[in-house]
């Protein structure tokens, strides 16, 4: 509206070319003034920021107030690793927590973290982690194997409803536990019923090394010095035990199977 008013006002006194020249000059001045005002505002903002925060860029020593500002993008859903599955949360989890192993910064191979070393059997069905003794919680309490067992069981607990529980399904019976499935005992002997006793037809999948009889693979764990690791632990015996029969957690689905095979 200002531009139209100026053109009408000057048309009675000046030729059109002069009017356009005057308007262009005024517009140019206004643009210059706007740019100068914007620049001065940015300088003021930067001064305020600089006065409130210590400059850290390019330095190798941390700020005196020892404050870390981490720009992570969206607001995290949760600080619980068993709950969230997003990338913003994953970045925070990687910064806050340490696991058994860590990623190599270049190859992404597994490297020691809280586990200083680990033994793997010949078919990679069993892993034995040896924890370092100086690992501590933030309150100073030592970290032990029970802490990792608790974390895995909690993440797989159906009540937690973890969206990433399936990542742990490689663990024996983890999926059955997460889906509230059941083992079945023989009411007369008290022993668990085995999956192989109810298999229809011959097995079509090869039996893993951990499913073979205990003692048949004395050199299952090969150490660096050429000897074999002890294989008489309770964990090892459990891993070598035959697979148990698993029935679904749904009562309707479970009863259907029981009715079909009393």
Image (tube, grey):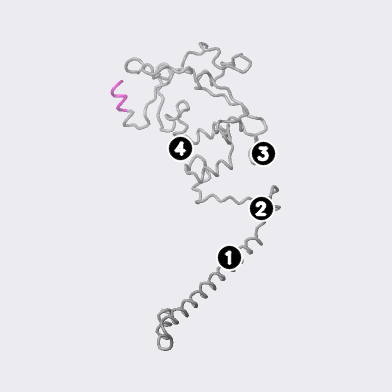
Give residue 107's quadrant in the image.
top right
At label 2, counting other C-alpha atoms closer than 10 Å, the crowd grade (few under 14, some 14-19, many 20 or more) is: few
The residue identified by callout 4 is: 164
* Residue 217 relative to residue 245: left or right: right
Q: Quadrant of the C terminus?
A: top left
The reply to whether discs 4 and 2 touch (Cβ–Cβ < 8 Å) is no
* Residue 16 relative to residue 218: left or right: left
Closer to the eye: label 3 or 1: 1
* Residue at 44 percent of width and 36 percent of height: 158
Closer to the eye: label 3 or 4: 4
Closer to the eye: label 2 or 1: 1
For marks 1 and 4, the one nearer the N-term is: 1
**Mark 4–mark 2 distance (CA, rounded to whole Å):** 37 Å
For marks 4 and 2, the one nearer the N-term is: 2
The reply to whether discs 1 and 4 touch (Cβ–Cβ < 8 Å) is no
In the displayed structure, 41 sits above or below 164; it is below
In the displayed structure, 24 sits above or below 15; it is above
Magenta range: 255-262
- Give the total of numbered labels: 4
- In this orientation, which residue lies closer to the viewer: 146 or 59? 59
For marks 3 and 1, the one nearer the N-term is: 1
Give the label on residue 140, or none: 3
Question: Residue 240 at what x, y percent from top left?
Answer: 49, 17
**Extreme residue in the bottom direction:** 13
The residue identified by callout 1 is: 42
- In this orientation, which residue lies closer to the viewer: 131 or 1? 1
In the displayed structure, 253 sits above or below 194; it is below
């Amino acid at each position: 509206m200002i531009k139209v008013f100026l053109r009408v006002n000057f048309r009675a006194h000046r030729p059109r070319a002069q009017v356009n020249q005057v308007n262009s000059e005024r517009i140019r001045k206004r643009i210059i003034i706007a740019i100068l005002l914007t620049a001065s505002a940015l300088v003021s903002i930067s001064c305020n920021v600089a006065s409130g925060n210590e400059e850290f860029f390019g330095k190798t020593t941390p700020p005196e107030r020892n404050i870390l500002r981490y720009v992570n993008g969206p607001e995290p859903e949760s600080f619980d690793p068993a709950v969230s599955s997003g990338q913003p949360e994953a970045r925070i989890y990687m910064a806050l927590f340490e696991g058994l192993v860590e990623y190599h910064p270049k190859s992404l191979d597994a490297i020691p973290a809280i586990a200083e070393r680990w033994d793997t059997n010949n078919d990679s069905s069993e892993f034995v982690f040896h924890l370092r003794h100086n690992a501590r919680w933030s309150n100073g309490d030592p970290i032990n194997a029970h802490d990792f067992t608790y974390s895995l069981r909690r993440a797989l607990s159906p009540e937690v409803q973890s969206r990433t529980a399936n990542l742990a399904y490689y663990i024996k019976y983890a999926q059955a536990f997460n889906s509230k499935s059941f083992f079945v005992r023989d009411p007369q002997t008290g022993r668990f019923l085995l999956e192989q006793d109810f298999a229809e037809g011959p097995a079509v999948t090869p039996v893993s090394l951990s499913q073979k009889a205990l003692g048949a693979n004395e050199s299952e764990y090969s150490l660096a010095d050429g000897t074999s690791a002890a294989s008489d632990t309770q964990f090892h015996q459990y891993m070598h035990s035959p697979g148990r029969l698993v029935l679904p957690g749904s009562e309707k689905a479970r009863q259907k199977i029981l009715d079909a095979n009393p």
